[in-house]
Amino acid sequence: MDGQILGGVLFLWRGIFWFVTTPYFLIFAPMWNQVTVLIKKEMTLEWRQKYALNGILLYVVSAVFITYLSVQGALSIPTWNALYWIIILFSAVNAVAKSFVQEHQGRQLYYYMIASPEAIIVSKIIYNTLLTLVLALLGYLVFSVILGNPVEDQGLFIVNLALGAIGFSACLTMVSGIASKAGNNATLMAILSFPIIIPILLMAISISKNAIDGLDRGVSYDKLITLLAINAIVTAVAYILFPYIWRS
Amino acid sequence: MKAYWWKVLAIVLLAYTLIAGLLLDVPRLAILNETIRALYFHVTMWFGMIIMLVVAVYYSIKYLRKGDLRDDDLAIEFTSAGILFGVLGIATGMLWAKYTWGDYWSGDPKQNGSAIALLMYFAYLILRNSLTDVHQRARIGAVYNIFAFAAYIPLIFVLPRLTDSLHPGNGGNPGFNAYDLDSKLRMVFYPAIIGWTLLGAWIATVRVRYRRIERKLEDKLINQV
């Protein structure tokens, strides 16, 4: 037992040492080619099956419109903020949920043979980040047009959107990988991702509140760093764990 | 005797916790009054839960590295024990909160944090049950367990920063260091943590053994034909 604990500590220490001292460009250079090719593939695929993309875009617009009709009249700023993020969250869950099921098993096996799992998860995360960002910007546009735009610090708001999109996409891509192994029903995707995404969502909402109120950027600086750190943790863990789901 | 000394220790410590926790003198404080004894029965649940969950994550990592189903048994059963402690912790906490804060649920960050933890681990159980292949279930379960735990740690640090906690020891409320000057509380508190944790480990190991026997019988049944 003692030997095991010592082994664990050594393993952890080697991990930290590796993490701090590695010249990353050497590790990622060969992977990077794969990643760019895979991202291009995702985009082509999305473009060919336009109905999926259009569907999710329409989802955002309808969701915002339903919200607008339901609130009937003035919306306080915290409520505006909360509703906006909830809609983005639900759209993102729906958009990312399909990332491992839109292609059938045979093709998955083909990717399994030609690409490393790390390249696949990185490319999916980057692609889903772009997709979530598009959804968030579209949502923002529609929100501004029909529910009014109370945001005073546009720059901070957009930066926060981008960070939120990275976090959402890293978390949801990983969870959709897990859910796809379990029959991929929508319920599973939601219940698995919601509790995990809460820290990202809460940080994003509180920064976005600061941006709406037009507070000095120094106030949000601390929170931006925290959000970035959470994103880094989630992405790193997804990067490490993904090969284990991919292999099965 | 060698193998089960810790079970005897668990019984002794819990008996001590029950007797001393209910009968021993406690500091007299306004609002808290006698409910301060919740320290031994409620706060210790959280320590138990976190320890159980850390052990479960350790065995999940071990499963992913070695692929031995015996590690998976430990991971799932320690998680279950953690969930049991979590549910008890929330139930006792809500009762206590009703008498001291006036409401069962007051949106306190620790309350919310624990509720989120339970959501995560209930989702974990559902995920496991939705998979039929034993190895697949173990692997995907382990991945989700580690992933959820990694996301949970920042949450514990983020939540309290967003709002103040009503809990003693947070947001200007004195913690028990402030009034436990003669360490009377500690004399029961620390043994209680160890006692409850050992009880949790006991429950988990019994269930692990049950699980392994079940699997053995199943294998026998399959190989017969």
Image (spheres, helix red, strand yellow):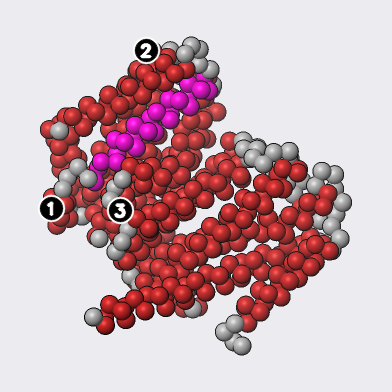
Mark 1 or mark 3, earlier in chain = 1
Badge 1, how many Cα within 10 Å: few under 14, some, many 20+? Answer: few
Q: Nearer the viewer, residue A88 or A24?
A: A88
Q: Compared with residue A83, is residue B8 higher up or lower down, i.e. above or below? A: below
Q: Nearer the viewer, mark 1 or mark 3?
A: 3
Range of magenta residues: A77-100
Helix, strand or loop for disc 1: helix
Q: Are marks 2 and 3 on the same chain?
A: yes
Q: Which residue is mark 1?
A: A106
Q: Nearer the viewer, residue A53 or A224?
A: A53
Name the residue tied to disc 2.
A145
Cα distance in 3D space between marks 2 and 3: 40 Å
Question: In this view of the protein, can residue A167 be seen by the observer?
Answer: yes
User: Is B22 inside the magenta-drawn segment?
Assistant: no
User: Is the residue at mark 1 from the same chain as the one at mark 2?
Assistant: yes
In which quadrant of the rendered image does the C terminus of chain A lie?
bottom left
Q: CA distance from mark 1 to mark 3?
A: 17 Å
Q: Main secondary structure of the magenta part?
A: helix
- Give whichever of discs 2 and 3 has the lower sequence position: 2
Helix, strand or loop at label 2? It is helix
User: Which amino acid, mark 3?
Assistant: Ala
Disc 1 and disc 2 in contact, CB within 8 angstroms: no
> At which x and y percent is residue B4?
59, 82
Amino acid type, residue under disc 2 in the picture:
Val
In front of the other: B144 or B133? B133
Identify the image quadrant of residue A91. top left
Total numbered circles: 3
Query: Which quadrant would residue A63 be assigned to in this image?
Result: top left
Q: Is residue A23 left or right of residue A3?
A: left
